Image (cartoon, helix red, strand yellow):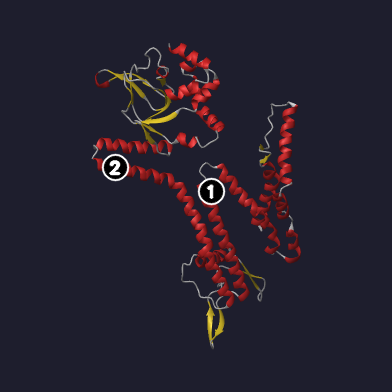
Amino acid sequence: MVLDYTCDLIYLIDMLVIKPRLRFMKGGISVVRRRRNTYQFLEEITSYLQKARDETLKNYLMSSGFKLDLIAMIPTDIIYMYSGPTPIWRLNKLTKIPSFWQLFDLLDNSFSSPSVIRVTRTLSYMIYIIHCNSCIYYLLSAWQAFGQIAYHENGKWYLNKWVYNNQGYLQNTIDSNIRIGIPSGNAYIRCFYFTAAVATSTGNNPAPTNVIEYVYMTCSWMMGVFVFALLLGQIRDIVSNANRTREEYRRQMDMALSECKRLGLPKELTNRVRDWFIYTWEQQKTLGTAESTLLISDEKKLIEKLPLKLQTDLALSVHYNTLSKVQLFQDCDRALLRDLVLKLRPVIFLPGDMICKKGDVGKEMYIVNQGVLQVVGGENNQTVFAELTQGSVFGEISLLAIGGNNRRTASIRAKGYTTLFVLAKEDLNDVIKYYPQAQALLKRKAA
C-alpha cells in the first residue's frame, strides 16, 4: 500500500503541477507558460505571462487527458474500510496509461539521440505484458488451489505441477487453527519467471492438465510468437537505425581501402585514405564525397533539407561573427552577409596537405574552423613564416580578381587535421549581383 499511495502522490503532482504547464499549438503558435522575471514589472509583460499561464491551464482542463486524470484520482480506496485492501478497487488508476505514453513521446522529442528512450519504451511494453500474464497465472493457480494438487485421469491419479506451487509465500499465523498466506516479492518473481519462460518458448515447462490451462498456454505462446516478435523487431530496427550511419562508414572505408589495394597504391597513400575516414567520422559522424581535389562533408546536404529560414538561422549562428570580422566584408549590408553564410561549405584537410600554393589562381576564400595552418616558403616549403589558427581568414582578395590580385601570394599547408569553411568566387558572384552598392564597396576595398 505504501507503493500505491506513493504513486497516487506522483499522479497528483502530475495533475496539479506538470500537466497545466505543458505547451501546445494554437493556430500554428506554440503556447508555453513562461516564468515571471523578478525585474520585469511592466504591466503588459505581466499580463502576457498571465495569459500564457491561463491558456496552458485552460487547454489542459478542456482536454480528454484531464478527464482521465480526474478519474484516476477518484479515492476508490475508501471502499477498503468495508472490503479490506482489495486491489480491484484501484482499477481506475489504469486511466493514467496515456500519461505513460505521453511521457515517452516528450522524452523522445527532447533528446537528440532518442534510441535509448525508444528501446526502454519497447522493453517496458514487454515487461508490462509479462506482468499482466503473470497475474493471470497467479489467479488461475489460486482458483485451482496452490501447490501440486492431485487430479484424476484415465483411472489414475497424477500431481498437477502446472499451477504455482505456493513457494515464496509468507505465512501469518492468526491462531493455532488459522493461517493466512501473504504474497511476497519472491512469489511474484516465481510467477513472472514462469510466464516469461512460457511466452519466450524456452521449453521444459510443466504440461497443462485441463482446458483452462491449455487455453492459457495457447494464448501465452501466441503472445510470444506474435506480440513479442513484433516488439523485438522494433528493438532490432531501433538499434539498426542507430548504428546505420556507423555501418555505412565502415562499409565505405572497407570499399575504399580495397580499391586502394587493387590499384596497388603506396602504403603511405593508403594510410592517408584511412586516416581521412577515421578523422571525418570522429569529428562529424558522417562521411564526405569528393569534389575536385577537396573532400566535402555531407553537412550541407543535410542542412538543405531544412526550410530556408531555418537554414539561414543555423548558418548565421555558426558563421556570421567570423564572416563579419573579415576586413573585406566590413561595412557591408547585413543582408549580404546573411546570404553569404549559406554559401559556406566545410572542407577537411589532412596533415601535410597543401591548401594553396604561391602563384596559383585563387578562386576561394578560406576560414579556419578547426586546426592549425602554416604559411610556408623557401626550398621545398621547409620554412614556416607564420601560423593561422581558428578564426583566421585568407584568400579574400582573390575573390574579386581585380588588378591581377587573384594570384596566391603564399603557400599554406595544414599542420594537422584541419577543417576550413570555403567561400567560392562563383558563390560570391551569385549573391553580390543583388547588392550593387556592396559590390561597388568591395571593388574599392580590393583595388
Rendered view: 192 above or below 159: above
- Picture coordinates of residue 380 (x, y %)? 25, 21
- Picture coordinates of residue 261 (x, y %)? 26, 42
Earlier along the polypeptide chain: callout 2 or callout 1?
1
- Picture coordinates of residue 274 (x, y %)? 32, 39
Residue drawn at (73%, 55%) of the image? 71
- Picture coordinates of residue 243 (x, y %)? 44, 47
Give me the disc on residue 289: none
Residue neighbourhood size for the residue with mark 2, other residues' Cα within 10 Å, grouped as few (<14), some (14–19), many (≥20):
few
Looking at the rendered structure, the kind of residue marked 2 is: Glu
Q: Secondary structure at mark 1?
A: helix
Residue under numbered circle 1:
117
Looking at the rendered structure, the kind of residue marked 1 is: Ile
Rendered view: 79 above or below 274: below
Q: Is residue 268 visible?
A: yes
Residue drawn at (68%, 60%) of the image? 91
Residue neighbourhood size for the residue with mark 1, other residues' Cα within 10 Å, grouped as few (<14), some (14–19), many (≥20):
some
Q: Residue furthest bottom?
A: 155
Residue 57 sits in quarter: top right
Q: Nearer the viewer, residue 188 or 264?
A: 264
In the picture, which quadrant includes the N terminus? bottom right
Disc 2 vs disc 1: which is toward the camera? 2
Q: Nearer the viewer, residue 88 or 341?
A: 341
In the picture, which quadrant includes the C terminus? top left
Rendered view: 240 above or below 76: above
Residue 19 sits in quarter: top right
Measured Cα–Cα span from mark 2 to mark 1: 39 Å
Q: Nearer the viewer, residue 33 or 225?
A: 225
Q: Is residue 170 visible?
A: no
Give me the disc on residue 259: 2
Q: Secondary structure at mark 2?
A: helix
